[in-house]
Amino acid sequence: MSAVIGLCVALPLLASALVLGLRRVALARDVITLATMSAVTGLAAALLAEVDRNGTVVLRVGDWAPDLGIVLVADLFAALILLVASATILVVELFAIGQRRTPSGADPAVVSPILLVLAGGVSLAILTGDLFTLFVAFELILVASYVLLTHQGRESQVRSGMTYVVINLFASTLFLFGVAIVYAATGTVNLALLADRFPDLPAATQVGIGLWFLIVFGTKAAIFPLFSWLPDSYPTAPTTITAVFAGLLTKIGVYVLIRFFTLMELDELGPLLLVIAGFTMIVGVAGALAQDDVKRILSFHVVSQIGYMIMGLGLFTVAGVGGAVLFLVHQIPVKTVMFLAGGLIEDDQGTSALKKVGGLATSKPVIAVLFALPALSLAGLPPFSGFIAKLALVDAGMSSGAYVIVAVSLVGSILTLLSMTKIWLGAFWGEVTPSAVPASSRRSVTVMQTAAAVAVAGTIAIAVVAGPLWRMSEQVATDLLERTPYITDVLGEPLGEGAD
Amino acid sequence: MIFAVGGLAAAGTFLVTSRSLSRVVLGFALLGHAAVLALLAAGGPSGSPPIVDGEPAADTSNPLPQALSLTAIVISFGLTLFVLALARRQQFLTGDDLVEDDVEDRRIATTHEVPIDSTDETRELEALHEDSEPTS
């Protein structure tokens, strides 16, 4: 079973090279890309079933000992997120294929191979068992995202892309410094070994390393006050690209944050995380209220929703971390599908500015439905997945006595609903506006709508299987907070002292 | 070594915060070097080369940070090139290599300009401006 883990990383990268060679042969390119992502999704599903039944699967690359070589670890948390992430990329790729003949679409000859590189990076970041490979995976994701963001070379893209690249490059350099600090302090970069040795460090060093990585991963996750690059750069990219970014990039940051902070047992930073979470929720949603463009509103919501996951982590209880995991699983598809719906509006009307769009509920009821369902889920109304995830978090907050953050999160939810209403009033009700652009071909519209519909169905499916999912999230949280399962699974039998 | 890391990091950070893109690129080059040196410093004292004279393993340099550094160098080299290409593109589009203001932000800022004009703060600023005019 351990070979499957390797395939999840290697397959997209190999396919990417192949697709790059075949980029002028549209049919072969599309078939290979879709087949690869389907295969990765299938492998992830198999992995999840296996891990759920028999426990963590570990691959030691090249059969090196864990303190020297690279390990890839698929525990329940990793397998769960991997499945959701690869399924999301699959849907977006389908949308991209539909979008390619439209004026706002990205060049598929670039998007297909780079999206596969991104998929490989995401798999590696989720599965990796050591800090330096995590750095490499982040770079893989970021390089792919730089290219995706700027490849059309428009002026606004180059300008905001520059901000994005510079801030992320700076964070990556800080990450590298962080790796050096950790190596100097503990003599290892393997996460499991690190978790084993970390409690022996002086308390001040522990907090220092924790804060350092909070900045590094926090920049990737776009927490307050490190989020400024996000609402600026996301809306300028083509819709498909923004959908992937919104659904995955920040969430990978959150995933790593949860992984690192629970594994290193940095409970003392919990209150700080709660404060950050509160600010992230409110500032993000306040920014969304001030905007009047669908894509920009949604970009600010990306920031706001990150706050909820950080809140769950900050509580450092099984219920809290479980809630954060559930929220993560719910956010990846919902956020993606919201941007896909925004893309459908843009494709239909030629713009996504609220002032210039109106009456879509009567003229394009399909888009209205595709937008309304995830929007309600995002705001946390029952019976959608957002309600379940938020309920889990609020419940966890109440039982830990963190009433302030619970109140803040509820206010944030109401404001989210308010700004969703704003989009609805602006874009879907009111006077029917004539389209500013020629209609896209029927076939590409059908493909795009199908892709969005599949994603919407996915988000609803999350609500349907909420029971088993919650059990799984709780299991994940228990394992994460106990730490020992991860450490013993990765290291196997205790290491001999002669390994150095 | 530590002073070198500190100096490089400080100079790099200073350059990265500047508005001119060519300086930003240079800043990242310096920061990358600082990070690689920090990695090497984290590997402990240098030792004799391995294998050559049949040295015992305990006397040789720690190879792991060197492997990590090598990877980091390759990555930062590639990214420097990418940023350079982006800067070139920007120069092609706008004719200079300065980072530009966010157009959308400016638009939102100007929509509220009218009420702000009448506040005390702006009046004070205007007064200050008038005071300073004769001297300049």
Image (cartoon, coloured by chain):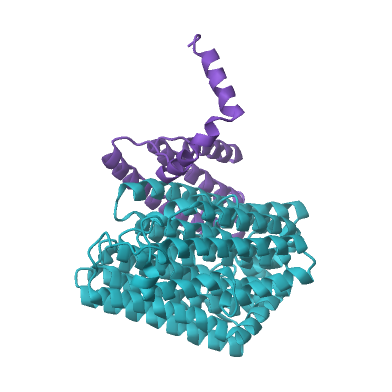
Chain colours: A cyan, B purple
Residue lying at 63% horizontally and 61% vertically, measured from the top left = A412
Residue lying furthest left in this view? A25
User: In this rendering, is residue B43 above or below A500?
Assistant: above
Q: Nearer the viewer, residue B28 or B132?
A: B132
User: Which quarter shows the C terminus of chain A?
Assistant: bottom right
Where in the figure is residue A102, as x and y percent of width and height?
25, 65
Residue lying furthest top in this view? B134
Where in the figure is residue A200, as x and y percent of width and height?
76, 61
Residue A305 occupies quadrant: bottom right
Residue A467 occupies quadrant: bottom right
* One can see residue A137 in this view: no
User: In this rendering, is residue A50 above or below A300?
Assistant: below
Q: Nearer the viewer, residue A126 or A7?
A: A126
**Number of marks present in the image shown:** 0
Q: Nearer the viewer, residue B120 or B102?
A: B120
Residue lying at 38% horizontally and 66% vertically, measured from the top left = A359
Residue lying furthest right in this view? A401
Residue lying at 65% horizontally and 68% vertically, measured from the top left = A193
User: In this rendering, is residue B4 above or below A269?
Assistant: above
Q: Nearer the viewer, residue A127 or A233?
A: A233
Residue A107 occupies quadrant: bottom left
Where in the figure is residue A225, as x and y percent of width and height?
59, 49
User: In this rendering, is residue A181 above or below A243?
Assistant: above
* One can see residue A460 in this view: yes
Where in the figure is residue A490, as x and y percent of width and height?
61, 76
